[in-house]
Image: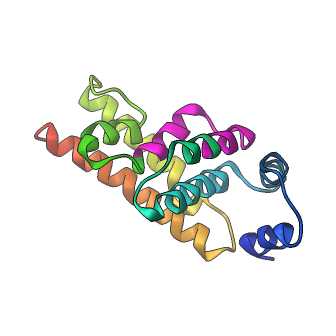
Amino acid sequence: MLFFERFNELLKGREIFTQRVSLYLYSRTSYEVRLQILHFLFAIAQADGIIKESQYYKIHEISRFFRISERDFASIKAMFGQRDSQILDAYTVLEIDKSATDAEVKKAYREMAKKYHPDKVISQDEAIRKGAEEKFKQVQRAYEQIMKERGN
């Protein structure tokens, strides 16, 4: 059964608490798939153009139930940040500081590319695979943006 079909089945006809659903998903999905779920949650929250503070709080709560690292959460959150701070978001996406050397930027890019490569997300669900591809592209764009800003 596809992931989202199972999730919808759980929700039918009864109130489900965030913790219960999150722990269910935690026990049945890989870390990479849980990262993709967070990515989807941010995209859904941003559908009306802005992510409200209450939505950030709920997504962060889910990330803790998923046992997602704070760095990974911040990286995904940065992908959905305001565009006026795009270069800082690029550094956050790669989980590095602006003071990082070119070698550190390249190393961080390689690590993030491995972590978010679509081949690492093993799922029969097409939406999860497409989400992984988008996240991987965002990591690539962040790296290219930093290199362009640095004149490399």
Question: In the displayed structure, does residue 97 sit left or right of residue 122?
Answer: left
Examine the structure image and report whether residue 5 is included in the region drawn in magenta.
no
What residue appears at the point 69 percent right and 45 percent down from the top-left corner?
62
Residue 114: % across, % down: 50, 49
Q: Classify the position of the C terminus by image quarter.
A: top left
Query: Residue 104 is drawn in which quadrant?
Result: top left
Q: Classify the position of the N terminus by image quarter.
A: bottom right
Question: In the displayed structure, does residue 9 sit left or right of residue 81?
Answer: right
Near-viewer residue (66 or 52) = 52
Residue 25: % across, % down: 78, 55
Question: With respect to residue 116, does 2 lie above or below?
Answer: below
Residue 118: % across, % down: 53, 62
Near-viewer residue (123 or 19) = 19
Count of numbered marks? 0
Examine the structure image and report whether residue 67 is included in the region drawn in magenta.
yes
State the residue lying farthest toward the right: 14
Residue 64: % across, % down: 69, 37
Question: With respect to residue 11, does 104 lie above or below?
Answer: above
Near-viewer residue (49 or 109) = 49
What residue appears at the point 68 percent right and 48 percent down from the top-left corner?
31
Main secondary structure type of the part rendered in magenta: helix
Query: Residue 103 is drawn in which quadrant?
Result: top left
| Rendering colour mode | rainbow
State the residue lying farthest toward the left: 151
Q: What stretch is highlighted in magenta?
A: 59-78
What residue appears at the point 63 percent right and 57 percent down from the top-left corner?
37
